[in-house]
């Protein structure tokens, strides 16, 4: 829609301009640092950083109802920079001029209602938010769009050059970083560090296809993360993991989109997200808190983090009911089908601790919970979801298993609707479906396939004497007629088809 077609009172707000003042804020010592250079940890105390809008109060001068209109009307604009997550420009990067925004089609992912069968199975009405429909097929693109837009701004306006964007990954981050890195014609190269053998073939293929330098190292994700952290401290590289606070800003858009999809009435929702490196739950909590602070949503939804028994440090931390007694202890991970979240020492843990406290202060103790699920539950949930019209990955399955468990244990009221994060596309994790269907899980996974969820192709093989088509070779018509008669008869029998009268 063209600007002059919008209501007059909205026009001045439709196309945002760069403005405001941002700083890195240390979540541990509270000190602030300038954003003119990329920082990942506090130079004073070494803790993780968040990005703070130093002029946040200016946004409060606009009433929540007007913000809602601005965001809703902006969705009708055709400007590429505002088609994705930057339609929330003021909340996620107002210092970035719209012309520096990199948009590869991320954001605006669908919120798909589960059918009655699946809701019954879960115990409550729910929706999947399909972040697998982002360009690199995972939610990471939200954060990458933000981190790369900021890099683009630094390159274009602050003279930054020869950037090597680097990340450690279980597969989604690397696919996304490599995709966004490859979009830059000049000035950005990308390298990704992967734990050897711990990334699915599809996810390995993604950064290779984008032309990134792919380096595999022994160990698990946590080991790769330590290497990139070391590199970012001692070498001139741009760290693209969610330790980079610009990633968190972009991923907040997930919360904004949920709010918008439910007309900003989300106080009765429960939002389920898997926890791996914990950047996602950080962004989700921060996103809802910001909306609440600006009066855009009148009430905060409940947020549930979900972890597998095989990678559960955050779950274990919150098992201790008394805040003062909680101690964070990294865990040694075991093989998990929720491989993207197979992380024992999440870098965002200090952020999570602080934000959970604030969230609970505003919305009550039960407003943030962490549930744990088994590998078996994750696989069964993913397959059940996908048999009911979804395209969820194992982490989406983890959310569904978590939701079901939360309802069964009474943590999540059956009458409360839920939104489940389907973080990536099912196709990225099809190896786990294959293992399930062919009953070939290694024992460490502790997954035993259920007969009713398995599936396999049936080969219709013509017996001797019936001609078979051979690719690239033409079949005589009579031979083809005999093959057709055999094959259609066999298929009709397999499917129990009734002949037309
Ligand atoms: N699951 C992640 C792990 C790294 O997460 P990040 O959000 O900190 O970059 C992945 O896909 O690599």
Image: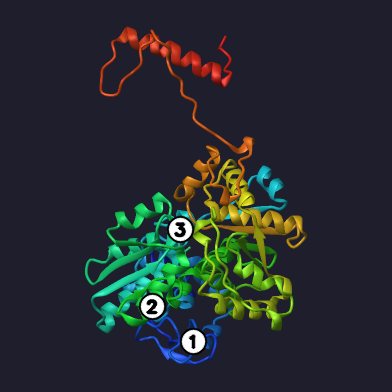
Q: How is the image coloured?
A: rainbow
Q: Is residue 309 above or below residue 473?
A: below
Question: What is the CA distance from the residue labelled 2 to the residue labelled 3?
Answer: 26 Å
Which one is closest to the eye, mark 2 or mark 3? 2
In the image, residue 275 lies at what x, y percent? 57, 65
Q: Are marks 2 and 3 in contact (CB under 8 Å)?
A: no
Question: What is the CA distance from the residue labelled 2 to the residue labelled 1?
Answer: 21 Å
* Dot label at residue 138: 3
Q: Is mark 3 within 8 Å of ligand 1?
A: yes
Secondary-structure class at tag 1: strand
| Nearer to me, 49 or 154 | 49
The N terminus, quarter of image:
bottom left
The C terminus, quarter of image:
top right
Which one is closest to the eye, mark 2 or mark 1? 2
Q: Is residue 211 above or below residue 487?
A: below
Residue to which mark 2 is pinned: 230
| Nearer to me, 5 or 247 | 247
């Amino acid at each position: 829609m063209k600007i002059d077609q919008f209501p007059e009172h909205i026009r001045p707000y439709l196309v945002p301009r760069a403005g405001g003042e941002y700083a890195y804020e240390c979540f541990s010592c509270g000190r602030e640092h300038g954003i003119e250079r990329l920082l990942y940890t506090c130079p004073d105390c070494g803790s993780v950083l968040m990005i703070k809008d130093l002029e946040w109060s200016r946004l409060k001068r606009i009433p929540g109802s007007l913000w809602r209109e601005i965001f809703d009307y902006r969705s009708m604009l055709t400007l590429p920079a505002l088609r994705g997550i930057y339609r929330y420009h003021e909340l996620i990067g107002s210092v970035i001029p719209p012309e520096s925004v990199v948009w590869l089609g991320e954001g605006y992912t669908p919120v798909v209602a589960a059918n009655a069968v699946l809701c019954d199975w879960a115990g409550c009405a729910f929706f999947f938010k399909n972040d697998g429909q982002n360009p690199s097929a995972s939610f990471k693109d939200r954060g990458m769009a933000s981190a790369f837009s900021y890099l683009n701004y630094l390159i274009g306006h602050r003279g930054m050059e020869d950037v090597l964007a680097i990340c450690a990954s279980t597969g989604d981050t690397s696919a996304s970083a490599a995709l966004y890195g490859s979009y830059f014609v000049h000035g950005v190269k990308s390298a990704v560090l992967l734990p050897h053998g711990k990334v699915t073939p599809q996810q390995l293929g993604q950064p290779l296809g984008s032309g990134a330098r792919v380096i595999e190292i022994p160990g698990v994700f946590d080991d790769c993360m330590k290497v990139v952290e070391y590199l970012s401290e001692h070498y001139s590289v741009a760290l693209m993991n969610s330790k980079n606070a610009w990633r968190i800003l972009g991923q907040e858009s997930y919360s904004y989109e949920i709010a918008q999809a439910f007309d900003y009435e989300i106080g009765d929702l429960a939002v389920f997200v898997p926890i791996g490196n914990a950047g996602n739950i950080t962004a989700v909590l921060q996103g809802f808190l910001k909306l609440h602070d600006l009066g855009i949503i009148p009430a905060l939804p409940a947020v549930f983090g979900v972890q597998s028994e095989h990678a559960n440090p955050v779950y274990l931390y919150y098992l201790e009911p008394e805040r003062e007694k909680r101690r964070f202890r990294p865990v040694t991970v075991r093989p998990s089908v929720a491989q993207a979240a197979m992380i024992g020492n999440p870098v965002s843990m200090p952020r999570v601790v602080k934000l959970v406290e604030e969230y609970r202060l505003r919305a009550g103790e039960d407003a943030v919970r962490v549930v744990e699920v088994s590998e078996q539950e994750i696989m069964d949930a993913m397959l059940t979801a996908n048999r009911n019209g979804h395209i969820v990955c194992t982490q989406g399955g983890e959310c569904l298993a978590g939701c079901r468990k939360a309802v069964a244990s009474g943590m999540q009221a059956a009458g409360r609707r839920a939104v489940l994060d389907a973080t990536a596309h099912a196709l990225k994790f099809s190896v786990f479906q294959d293992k399930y269907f062919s009953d070939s899980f290694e024992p460490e996974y502790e997954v035993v396939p259920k007969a009713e969820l398995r599936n396999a192709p049936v080969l219709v093989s013509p017996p001797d004497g019936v001609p078979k088509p051979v690719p690239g070779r033409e079949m005589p018509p009579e031979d083809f007629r005999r093959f057709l008669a055999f094959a259609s008869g066999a298929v009709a029998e397999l499917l129990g088809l009734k002949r037309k009268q």
